Image (cartoon, rainbow, N blue to C red):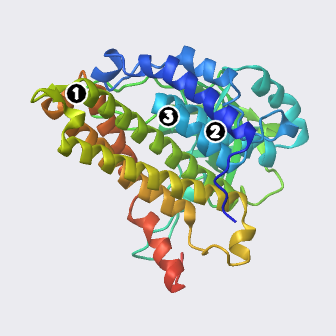
Amino acid sequence: MFNLHLTAEQIEFRDTVRSFAMNEIRPLAIHPERLESFDKPLLRVLLDKASELGLRTLTLSEESGGVGADTMTSCIVFEELAAGDVDIAIMLGQTSLLGDLLFDSWMENDQKVSFLPQFIEDETFHLSCAGGIPEILNSWCYHGNLHEKPKAELTAVRESNEWIIDGSVSYVANAPIAELFIVMAETGSNGTGADGTIGLLVSRNTPGFTINASKNAVGESDINWRHGCGTGVEFNSCKVPLENQICKHEKTLVIGEHYSRQISLQTAAINLGLGRAAFDAAVEYAKIRRQGGRNIVEHQAIGKKIADMAIKLELASTIIWKAAWVADHPEAVADRSISDLPQHTIASIFTAEAVHEVTLIAAECFGAMGVMRDMPVQKYVNDGFMFLHSDINDITTRLPIAEKVVNYRRSKAA
């Protein structure tokens, strides 16, 4: 049955990351220079320190040199990390999940010999994916049949013993820090993707590959309303050896449901960490702010707000842990101990709504100061909005829950 007892290893991981996040990350994460500008300074030193704790290779299998953490452990760790800073958690989470997918599922043995040692030994070695995951490229609209694939951003043409990549992607997560890119390109000569999607490994310094400078200044049209770091990339006759193609013998790159569940749950856990940070800020302020001859934490109205936030965060934590446990124990669904509803989707949606409400309540605890740009709570509100309105919490994400309930699925093609 669903067990809330953590193992000794999980408790040790949690406490270690919690101490690091509270004592080292959070003080710098809420420094005024990171609260004033959309172009937030990258806390690269702290990112590297977090990597040294094993968080960059958290979900990579032990056989490949990683920690081999299960979904539950991953959620626990990234929640604690995000309570210090959401951006660091997002960047490390991206590398962690891509590392698991790439080295444990997609790479051939000879490719591992070339790339895996670098990834394991270099704490600054991060991963990124340009061009999108195939399932995302082939997404479909609930309110109509999908008649054609969207036009590819990147194309690859084979010449002799090389693939030549052309095109650009407007935003690639982790691009400013990544050393190795998984590039999804269409092999159709006219860019329609008639021959399918292939994955190619492209190193940062490959000729013909350009990582654009970040443009997130206030007043510009392309302000980055995303967590973590990212920027656009361009390919201009970028030549990649044939041996850099991953999943050579597959018609399409296979991404299992487990990976999709991990993405949703890891993001939900990071979102929950944000909610905890907003909650902590509100409680700390309520303990020192005096009004009416006593600290406002003693006022009934503030007490209700604190209780409401605590309830929402506790429920979000419970649903995330349940969904993570189900992801690690699929037999619970197979034997009908747990419903077959997509628990990871439910956890993601509920957490986004709950944390959004928590950040707003936290801002109310600060009164008029809650909207001031030099107060961390306004950052938490903005971060909560971004999670709430992300593409993994929109209406098309919710509708598969209804489809599961009524046993219905709209056709992808006419």
Q: Can residue 157 be seen in this snapshot?
A: yes
Q: Is residue 27 above or below residue 128?
A: above
Q: Position of residue 244 (x, y in %)?
A: 78, 37
Looking at the image, is mark 3 or mark 2 earlier in the sequence?
Answer: 3
In the rendered structure, the answer to whether residue 249 lies left or right of residue 335 reads: right
Amino acid marked by disc 1 = Gly
Residue bearing the label numbered 1 = 219
Q: CA distance from mark 1 to mark 3?
A: 28 Å
- The residue that label 3 is drawn on is 82
Is disc 1 in contact with disc 3, using a CB cutoff of under 8 Å? no
Mark 1 or mark 3, whichever is nearer to me: 3
**Which residue appears at 84% of the width and 37% of the height?**
64
Q: Amino acid at mark 3?
A: Ala
Q: In front here: 374 or 204?
A: 374
The residue tagged 2 is 165
Q: CA distance from mark 1 to mark 2?
A: 33 Å
* Above or below, 373 relative to 341: above
In contact (CB < 8 Å): disc 3 and disc 2: no
